[in-house]
């Protein structure tokens, strides 16, 4: 911290330390701003220019299209590692040894059983309830069945809480899906690996044996790896903020699920499919809708293109496009929605308007296509996102607690009425 940042106001000069991250990111440390200046705060709607923490988990450079977890490029992790390997890396800091991985996987499997009384809570929801609302509620309910306070300074207790949520969360997600479909509830099969178990619990019919598809499994595993962590996004910062009050891991994850539910965050891939269906209803003329997207006076928006952070390309999208192509080719599905998606992708990638503005298809565009091809209903898209993001939420919560970060308490700029005298009812 040899550099300093200077702030001048009304003839007074204030100096603040400048910190430089390991990837040469620069941050002015302003935690003393309000105290030193007698009440001045920064105003940053959406916190787009505000760093809320220091983190060792994920590095993201949107201008260069870089995403790394603990120093490992997302391209290497998605192609070479399993979902639980990446989860272990993100949560504990290093890739696991063979012995560590075997124990991690076994301990997660020990925790796949869910208390039967959870079913009573699930039964209370109408079938039409959105699976994300069900998932958030059931995750929060885990606190009732695990009321013990987790000592964050105990490696054993932290590890136990982590393997519990990793084991039970996919079961709750699959049950939310079954509730929505009016289908029987499936339990985990500990002879299967993590990803195969998720697919089995969602698709197995009690009257027939479950048969997996290796191409579908590979695509699902890669897709979930690509969603594991993405720095301080809305749901992740929510998990950290809730956890800063020393709320439990389960309660904090439940809050993250609710934050992810929004259409501007995890619901974006659902919006892609809804857009494609709108194009089909409008006659399927892709060029017409491309023109509408270019017209700034037209309310139509082209969903699944561009990204709030990536100003070049989304490295996750380049990877998942290959999986999307493989799944579509293997399943041979004749779906007009998927045909429109492929046509839209081709036109947009070759249109100067989109190329100049770097509006490339993002991970939400391709993930929606894959989920559609697998027959996953649109209401479940965000649930699948949540399963993928779970390890990142855990890692961020763990890091926040281990760093003993203070409770989150943003400030505001008040713009309401100044002091007024109270008038009785008859005087108003």
Image (cartoon, rainbow, N blue to C red):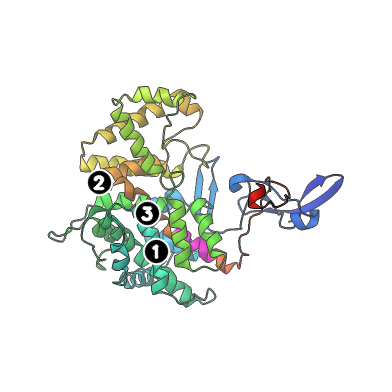
Which residue is nearer to you in this view: 320 or 71? 320
Query: Residue 397: within the magenta?
Result: yes
Between label 3 and label 2, give the one nearer the viewer. Answer: 3
Q: Magenta stretch?
A: 392-398
Q: Give the total number of marks visible in the rendering.
A: 3
Q: Secondary structure at mark 2?
A: loop
Mark seen at residue 375? 2
Q: Residue at x 73, y 50 (%)?
A: 419
Q: CA distance from mark 3 to mark 2?
A: 18 Å
Query: Residue 250: within the magenta?
Result: no
Q: CA distance from mark 2 to mark 1?
A: 25 Å
Q: CA distance from mark 3 to mark 1?
A: 10 Å
Mark seen at residue 315? none
* Residue that carries the numbered disc 1 in the rendered image: 139
> Tag 2 or tag 3, which sits nearer the N-term?
3
Mark seen at residue 132? 3
Q: Secondary structure at mark 1?
A: helix
> Tag 1 or tag 3, which sits nearer the N-term?
3
Left or right: residue 336 compared with residue 148: left
């Amino acid at each position: 911290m040899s550099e300093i940042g200077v702030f001048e106001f009304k003839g007074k000069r204030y100096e603040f330390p400048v910190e430089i991250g390991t990837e040469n990111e620069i941050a002015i440390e302003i935690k003393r701003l309000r105290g030193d200046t007698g009440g001045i705060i920064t105003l940053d709607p959406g916190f787009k220019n505000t760093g809320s923490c220091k983190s060792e988990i994920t590095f993201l450079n949107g201008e260069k299209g870089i995403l790394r977890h603990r120093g490992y490029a997302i391209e290497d992790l998605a192609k070479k590692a399993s979902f639980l390997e990446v989860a272990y890396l993100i949560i504990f800091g290093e890739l696991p040894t063979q012995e560590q991985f075997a124990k991690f996987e076994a301990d997660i499997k020990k925790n796949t059983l869910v208390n039967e009384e959870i079913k009573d809570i699930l039964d209370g929801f109408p079938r039409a309830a959105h699976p994300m609302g069900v998932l958030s509620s059931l995750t929060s309910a885990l606190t009732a069945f695990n009321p013990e306070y987790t000592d964050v300074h105990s490696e054993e207790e932290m590890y136990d809480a982590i393997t519990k949520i990793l084991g039970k969360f996919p079961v709750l997600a699959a049950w939310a899906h079954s509730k929505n479909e009016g289908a029987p509830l499936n339990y985990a099969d500990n002879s299967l690996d993590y990803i195969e178990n998720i697919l089995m619990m969602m698709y197995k019919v009690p009257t027939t044996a479950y048969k997996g598809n290796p191409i579908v499994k590979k695509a699902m595993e890669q897709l979930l790896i690509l969603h594991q962590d993405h720095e301080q996004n809305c749901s992740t910062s929510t998990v950290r903020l809730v956890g800063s009050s020393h709320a439990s891991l389960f309660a904090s994850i439940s809050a993250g699920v609710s934050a992810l539910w929004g259409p501007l965050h995890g619901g974006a891939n659902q919006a892609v499919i809804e857009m494609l269906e709108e194009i089909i209803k409008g006659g399927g003329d892709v060029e017409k809708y491309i023109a509408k997207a270019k017209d700034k006076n037209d309310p139509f928006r082209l969903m699944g293109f561009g990204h709030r952070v990536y100003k070049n390309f989304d490295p996750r999208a380049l990877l998942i496009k290959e999986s999307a192509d493989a799944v579509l080719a293997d399943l041979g599905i004749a779906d007009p929605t998927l045909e429109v998606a492929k046509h839209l992708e081709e036109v947009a990638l070759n249109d100067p308007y989109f190329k100049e503005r770097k509006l490339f298809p993002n991970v939400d565009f391709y993930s929606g296509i894959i989920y559609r091809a697998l027959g996953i209903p649109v209401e479940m898209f965000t649930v699948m996102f949540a399963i993928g993001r779970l390890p990142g939420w855990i890692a961020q919560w763990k890091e926040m607690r281990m760093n003993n970060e203070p409770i989150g308490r943003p400030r505001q700029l008040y713009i309401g009425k100044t002091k007024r005298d109270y008038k009785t009812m008859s005087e108003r």
